[in-house]
Amino acid sequence: MALPEIGKQAPAFSLPDQHGRIRGPQDYKGRVLVIYFYPKAMTPGCTVQACGIRDSRKRLEQLDVAVLGISTDPVARLAKFADKEKLNFTLLADEDHAVADHYGVWDLKKFMGREYMGIKRMSFIVGADGKLRHIMEKVNTKTHHQDVLAWIEANIELLK
């Protein structure tokens, strides 16, 4: 499936968070929202990426930015991940990858010569008006939080 179109409303969804509560973009109306897709909780790259976001909480709050991390992990694994790494943002379980499909991030991947379907690591920045404003297709797990903050700070007027 194709990526959502920049300038259009971000695709709506409802998924269980790490506590089993149903959440989606509609819960963050009026705020800038970062929706990031990651392959698997508690793996090295995903942990580095999540901890960078965790450690950026103060600046994200100053900018009134909420973060949703989405993977195909079950709720119990997300809860364990959040507890272990003391994550301070919402993780969502997309076990049937329907939301990943809708956002165009469920795709063929290759690892060590093996092909399989999985989540491509990507981030979507949604303005306070609910419109998709930016797609980060190339994500570096080590600098993701800095890259997100830099883009938001440079484009804050577009997002409010």
Image (tube, rainbow, N blue to C red):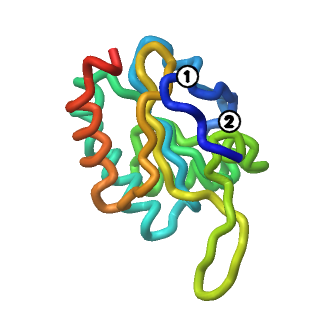
Which residue reaches farthest bottom? 113
Residue 127, numbered circle: none
Question: Which circle marks residue 16 in the picture?
Answer: 2
Taking 151 as reference, is 126 above or below it? above
* Three-letter code for the amino acid on which mark 1 is drawn: Lys
- Dividing the image into 4 quarters, which one contains the C terminus? top left
Residue at 31% across, 62% down? 142
* Relative to 32, 79 lies left or right: right
Q: Secondary structure at mark 1?
A: loop
Give the secondary structure at mark 2.
strand
Which residue is drawn at the image coordinates 68% and 34% (left, top)? 15
Q: What x and y, as percent, mark residue 129? A: 46, 13
Label 1 and label 2: CA atoms lie apart by 25 Å
Badge 2 density bin: few <14, some 14–19, many ≥20, Cα 10 Å:
some
Q: Could you tell me residue 111's position as x and y percent?
A: 59, 80
Report x, y in % for residue 134.
42, 35
Residue under label 1: 8
